Every structure is written in structure tokens, then in C-alpha cells.
Image (cartoon, rainbow, N blue to C red):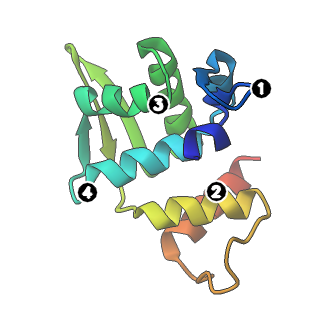
């Protein structure tokens, strides 16, 4: 189950009920949040804050935690992702086109894990993301 894999909920010792793991959300990789946003946004370049809150709710994030993670995404991927809060209008803007599977490929690459031997290695967006991170170090 996805939420248990992300350590957001836990199965009781008697395996009869689930409970929220409040500490689990602090271990949520920003790339997984990015994946959810990209998956939800479809073909548009902007995502409004109401949609971002709905996504955050899936991961048990309150407003401040969501904003902190959005800001962390902006720092990690400044050429791809922009979070703005201007005159009360909060939103995310994508500077480049990004597909959900590209985010997952990047995440697994950073984890040195290959979920499939058939993953394409030449995805341009992923090269740009990796290259940018290498130059920042």
C-alpha cells in the first residue's frame, strides 16, 4: 500500500487497523511531492494553491509544511520549478515541461535504484536536472 510505503500510515500490531504516522511525513522526499504535482497538473504550466493543498493533504502536510516543501523544490530545481506567493496568489509555475515518469526516473536514479532494466537513459529533462544538481555541489 502506497501510504504505508511512504510511512504516512502504519498497520497496528494486530494488523486490524491503520493509524496516521505524523512523523512519517517529515521523511517524504521532495521528489515524491513533485511527482504528485506533475501528475495532477496535466498539460498546464501553473498549479493553483487549492490543488496544491489537496495534494498536500494526501501526504498529511499542513500549510506550513507544504510551503516549506514547495520552497525546497524551488531550491533543488530552480530551472524547472517556481513557487510564488504574490499579493495573496499562491501557485506553482513550471518553467519547463515535465512528465511524471521523468520525475520518478530521476528519483530512482538519485537513489541508485533501477526499477526496470528498460528505463530510457537519454531523457533530456532528466539530464538537465542531474546536470544542474551536479553543478550546485
Q: CA distance from mark 3 to mark 4?
A: 18 Å
Whether the residues at callouts 2 and 4 have beta carbons within 8 Å, the answer is no
Is disc 3 placed on a helix, strand or loop? helix
Q: Residue at x 51, y 75 (%)?
A: 124
Relative side of 120 to 12, left or right: left
Q: Is residue 16 above or below residue 62?
A: below
Q: Is residue 40 above or below residue 21?
A: below
Q: CA distance from mark 2 to mark 4?
A: 20 Å
Q: CA distance from mark 2 to mark 3?
A: 16 Å
Question: Which residue has dot 3 on it?
Answer: 70
Q: Which one is closest to the eye, mark 2 or mark 1?
A: 1
Is disc 4 placed on a helix, strand or loop? loop
Q: Which one is closest to the eye, mark 4 or mark 1?
A: 1
Q: Earlier in the sequence, mark 2 or mark 3?
A: 3
Relative to the observer, which residue lies in front, 48 or 130? 48
Q: Residue at x 58, y 83 (%)?
A: 120
Q: Earlier in the sequence, mark 1 or mark 3?
A: 1
Whether the residues at callouts 1 and 3 have beta carbons within 8 Å, the answer is no
Q: Which one is closest to the eye, mark 2 or mark 3?
A: 2
The image shows residue 122 at horizontal and vertical percentages of 58, 83
Occupied quadrant, residue 47: top left
Question: Which residue has dot 2 on it?
Answer: 107
Is disc 2 placed on a helix, strand or loop? helix
Question: Which residue has dot 4 on it?
Answer: 42
Q: Which one is closest to the eye, mark 3 or mark 4?
A: 4
Question: Which residue has dot 1 on it?
Answer: 13
Q: CA distance from mark 2 to mark 1?
A: 31 Å
Residue farthest bottom in this picture = 118
Q: CA distance from mark 1 to mark 3?
A: 34 Å
Q: Which one is closest to the eye, mark 1 or mark 3?
A: 1
Q: Earlier in the sequence, mark 2 or mark 4?
A: 4
Amino acid at each position: 500500500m502506497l501510504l504505508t510505503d511512504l510511512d504516512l500510515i502504519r498497520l497496528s500490531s494486530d494488523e486490524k487497523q491503520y493509524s496516521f504516522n505524523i512523523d512519517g511525513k517529515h521523511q517524504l522526499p521532495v521528489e515524491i511531492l513533485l511527482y504528485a504535482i506533475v501528475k495532477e497538473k496535466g498539460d498546464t504550466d501553473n498549479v493553483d494553491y487549492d490543488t496544491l493543498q489537496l495534494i498536500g493533504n494526501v501526504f498529511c502536510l499542513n500549510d506550513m509544511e507544504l510551503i516549506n516543501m514547495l520552497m525546497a523544490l524551488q531550491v533543488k530545481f530552480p530551472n524547472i520549478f517556481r513557487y510564488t506567493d504574490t499579493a495573496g496568489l499562491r501557485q506553482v509555475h513550471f518553467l519547463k515541461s515535465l512528465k511524471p515518469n521523468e520525475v520518478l526516473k530521476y528519483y530512482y536514479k538519485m537513489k541508485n535504484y533501477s526499477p526496470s532494466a528498460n528505463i530510457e537513459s537519454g531523457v533530456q529533462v532528466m539530464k538537465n536536472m542531474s546536470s544542474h544538481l551536479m553543478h550546485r555541489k
